[in-house]
């Protein structure tokens, strides 16, 4: 089984909608943030559940007075756990999400740092990351071209 077949099987198992939840870009599988949130709330076939951090470590302004190497930044971190039906931890991963002026052109760096940490943690915990699956919040690093199957979004509300 190749990665494409495996990903499509995982997408089917987790009931991901190819018209809303994922697309391919430059040969990479991209999941929307909403799809990652959906993954975080579902049980696996074995009855395992994702536990996201209830307390996040937050660092503002990087590691030096003026910020990190790209200037001021926000960094979220936390430990994600996969638990069995009895609440026993089976697997855990530590995740970091960062946002600074070089990797986030939008004015909400706190939200972007959180989304990156969340998405990275869930995808790593469920082994999607091992298949080369990315979150849409990561895709900006290689999204020079529009996706061949764009994610549909609602029309803006009239002003």
Image (tube, rainbow, N blue to C red):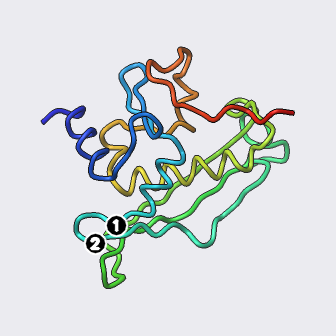
Q: Quadrant of residue 48?
A: bottom left
Considering depth in this image, is 114 or 78 the residue closer to the camera?
114
Could you tell me which quadrant the N terminus lies in?
A: top left
Query: Is 32 placed above or below 115 here?
Result: above
SS at mark 1 in the image:
loop
Alpha carbon separation for disc pair 2 and 1: 5 Å
The C terminus - image quarter: top right
Residue nearest the viewer, comparing 8 with 75: 8
Q: Residue furthest left?
A: 1
Q: Position of residue 81 (x, y in %)?
A: 42, 68
Quarter where residue 153 is shown: top right
Q: Position of residue 67 (x, y in %)?
A: 79, 43
Residue 125 position, x and y percent, is 38, 57
Horizontal placement of 12 versus 24: left or right? Answer: left
- Which residue position is annotated with label 2? 47
Considering depth in this image, is 6 or 96 the residue closer to the camera? Answer: 6
In the image as oriented, which residue stretches furthest toward the front? Answer: 158
Q: Is residue 118 left or right of residue 91?
A: right
* SS for dot 2: loop
How many C-alpha atoms fall within 10 Å of the one at disc 2: few (<14), some, or many (≥20)? few
> Mark 1 sits on what residue?
43
Q: Which residue is pictured at 34% across the width and 50% down the height?
A: 15
Is residue 22 placed above or below 45 in the rendered structure?
above
What residue sits 28% from the left and 46% below the top? 12
46 displayed left or right of 83: left
Q: Residue at 30% across / 72% down in the picture?
A: 90
- The count of marks equals 2
As drawn, is 85 to the left or to the right of 21? Answer: left
| Residue sticking out furthest to the bottom | 86
Measuring 42% from the left and 30% from the top, which residue is drawn there?
A: 23
| Dots 2, 1 in contact, CB < 8 A | yes
How far across and how far down the image is residue 6, in percent? 21, 40
């Amino acid at each position: 089984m190749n990665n494409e077949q495996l990903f499509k099987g995982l997408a089917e198992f987790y009931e991901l909608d190819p018209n809303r939840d994922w697309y391919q870009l430059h040969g990479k599988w991209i999941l929307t943030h909403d799809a990652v949130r959906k993954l975080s709330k579902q049980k696996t076939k074995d009855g395992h559940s994702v536990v996201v951090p209830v307390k996040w470590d937050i660092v503002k302004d990087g590691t030096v007075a003026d910020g990190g190497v790209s200037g001021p930044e926000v960094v979220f971190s936390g430990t994600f756990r996969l638990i069995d039906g009895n609440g026993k931890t089976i697997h855990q991963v530590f995740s970091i999400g960062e946002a600074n002026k070089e990797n986030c052109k939008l004015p909400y760096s706190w939200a972007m740092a959180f989304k990156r940490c969340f998405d990275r943690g869930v995808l790593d915990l469920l082994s999607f990351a091992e298949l080369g699956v990315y979150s849409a919040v990561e895709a900006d690093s290689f999204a020079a071209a529009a996706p061949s199957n764009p994610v549909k979004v609602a029309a803006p509300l009239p002003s």
